[in-house]
Image (cartoon, rainbow, N blue to C red):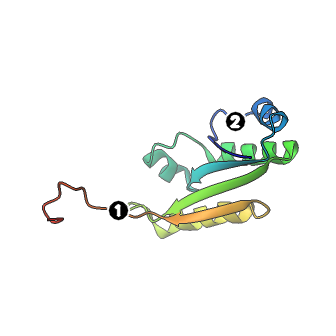
Amino acid sequence: MENWGRINGFTLGLAELLKRAGCEQIHFGVESGFGKVLQRIKKDIHISSVLESVEICRKTELQCLASFIVGFPFETWDDVKRTRQLIASLNKKKCSLFRAQAYPLPCDPAVG
């Protein structure tokens, strides 16, 4: 069984409870490896919390997946590099990477 989880609020006690309930894997939407990007998208997490949550998963033998997004309109190549570095530091974990895609609003006159 897989569960989606949030980094903020994830504790050792919660992980142990999930494990006892039969959870085998948890998926975190980390989104970026750079704190300023996380602030800008109002993610309300810190990189240190990501690392701590991954360590909790290791301790409780929960499989940990992390997803990331690159290509926010305000993101720089250095920001993307920091995300790549965080993914590399989680090399024993499964990570997925998505590209941000902006779509025009339906009320946009350019849409027709």
Residue 91, disc: none
Q: Is residue 99 above or below residue 12?
A: below
Image location (x, y in percent) of residue 46: 60, 44
Residue nearest the viewer, comparing 8 with 74: 8
Q: In this view, does 99 lie above or below 47?
A: below
Residue nearest the viewer, comparing 28 with 91: 28
Residue nearest the viewer, comparing 33 with 100: 100
Mark 2 to mark 1: distance in Å?
Answer: 30 Å
Q: Where, quadrant-wise, is the C terminus in this rendering?
A: bottom left
Q: What element carries label 1?
A: loop
Q: Which quadrant of the structure image shows residue 67?
A: bottom right
**Residue at image location 62% in from the left, 66% down from the top:** 84
**Mark toward the start of the polypeptide (2 vs 1):** 2
Residue 10, disc: 2
Residue that mark 1 sits on: 102
Q: Label 2 is placed on what type of residue?
A: Phe
Tell me: 78 left or right of 63.
left
